[in-house]
Image (spheres, grey):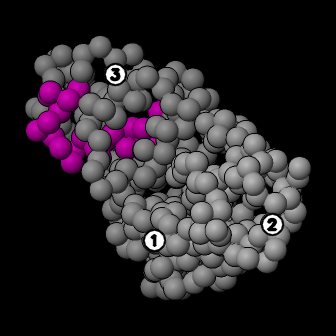
Amino acid sequence: MHQRFLHLVGTLLILAATAFPAGAQTYQLFAPKNVAQANLLNLLTYYYAYPERPSISAVLEDIESSRILETDWENAQYPVLGFLSKAFSAEPEALAKEIGPSYSHSLKSVILAALMMEFLDVYAPPAYQAIINNLPPDKRPPHIAAAKVGHPKQLDMLWGALFATGDPKFLDAILKVYEDQNGPTGNPRLDIAFQKVIEWAAWSNMQQHSLVERLMRERAATAAPYVAGRLRAIVSRFEASLESLNLGTREGLFSAMVALTDASIIEELKKPPSSGIRIVKKRRFSRQEDIFVHIAFNGMEVSESYQANVTFSSILRLPDGHEQQLYENRTAIVGPAPVRFSILSARDLHQFRLPDDAPAGDYLLRVTLSDNLSGKDLNLRADFTLVE
């Protein structure tokens, strides 16, 4: 009897990694204006961790269709430029066929700058080669690794290059400003502000990227004393902020929460992350309602190859005390997941409906969430009442 008690009416796995280059935040916080921009920023920010990276033409089409350069040119142009410069240099032979002729003026401008920055003139489509050849040599932008870091726009480009490649040298170029105790600009007040921008971006990206977290810890442990002190302060700030990332039930860095809700959650999860997700917790359900189980988790272990492995099992206790296994070792995340610390980064949503002959009364759902890389388990509980 109890083996067939629940009728599972379907499942929906949702993985939403919603981060964006902190370099873009050195001017003001960039908020995606629509779903296309949110998806694009996610792609640009975690491109280095994609096992099968989209083609250059697909990335350019996403940039164009999202209108990110048109809606916020000041903040978007430099991280996009840094990203494209490294994406182009990774596949130079493909550029002539991957770069199309009919982009907007803003995207064409960034493409031209990225081509010149990497000295890729010979690989550019003919129309772009002609424009580059007509420019005076002093109008060419400097190579991303050659310019002295002395302006936030250069930080934006370096963060974009880091997220395109995962190459630690771009983070090292950002942190190099601390090696000169006189500061990168020579203006004491500007240097302090400049360093604060770096510290904020590094702290923010430690939360968003397991890559940046790992690199910052390594650099803090091996740098010269003066530099190491500044880096340790950033790491300490990151560690102090972990409490704010605690979702409720916590074991070390791993935390999670479970909430019971209704079908409204599906529409909420379709919204751009910048608009916020509203979860209406419910404690009372009827037999005619689907019960949606929303699990959010944070701080799971991520391997050096940007993989995570989180599963869960759930058991429902009936009003008469009997228990029924709903799921055993169900996948929440198994595979690419570069985000370790982001409340919106990892979630599972599934649903069930109680049968028409289910007894009214109080029910208890017990969920065991397992981080299989760290070996940590979290025990979550949610109760509800089935009403007549």
Q: Amino acid at mark 2?
A: Tyr
With respect to residue 75, does 286 lie above or below?
below
Query: Within 10 angstroms of label 3, few (less than 14), some, or many (20 or more) residues?
Result: some
Q: Which residue is mark 1?
A: 309
Tell me: 120 left or right of 318.
Answer: left
The image shows residue 61 at horizontal and vertical percentages of 35, 26
Q: Which residue is mark 3?
A: 108
- In-front residue for pair 159/293: 293
Q: Separation of disc 1 and disc 3 at Cα?
A: 41 Å
Determine the secondary structure under disc 2.
strand
At x 66%, y 35%, the residue is: 267
User: Seen in the image, is 145 located left or right of residue 302?
Assistant: left
Q: Which residues are magenta?
A: 77-99
Residue that carries the numbered disc 2 in the rendered image = 363
Lower sequence index among marks 1 and 3: 3
Which residue is rendered at x = 45% and y = 69% of the image?
308
3D distance between C-alphas at marks 2 and 3: 59 Å
Mark 1, Cα crowd under 10 Å, few <14 / some 14-19 / many 20+, is many
Secondary structure mainly formed by the magenta segment: helix
| Mark toward the viewer: 2 or 3 | 2
Q: Three-letter amino acid code at disc 1?
A: Asn
- Most foreground residue, 374 or 147: 374
**Is 229 part of what is drawn in magenta?**
no
Q: Nearer the viewer, residue 183 or 258?
A: 258
Q: Quadrant of residue 166?
A: bottom left
Sequence order check, earlier mark of 1 and 2:
1
Contact (CB < 8 A) between labels 1 and 2?
A: no
Q: Give the Cα distance between marks 1 and 2.
A: 29 Å
Residue 321 in sight in this render: yes
| Other-residue count near label 2 (Cα within 10 Å), few / some / many at <14 / 14–19 / ≥20 | many
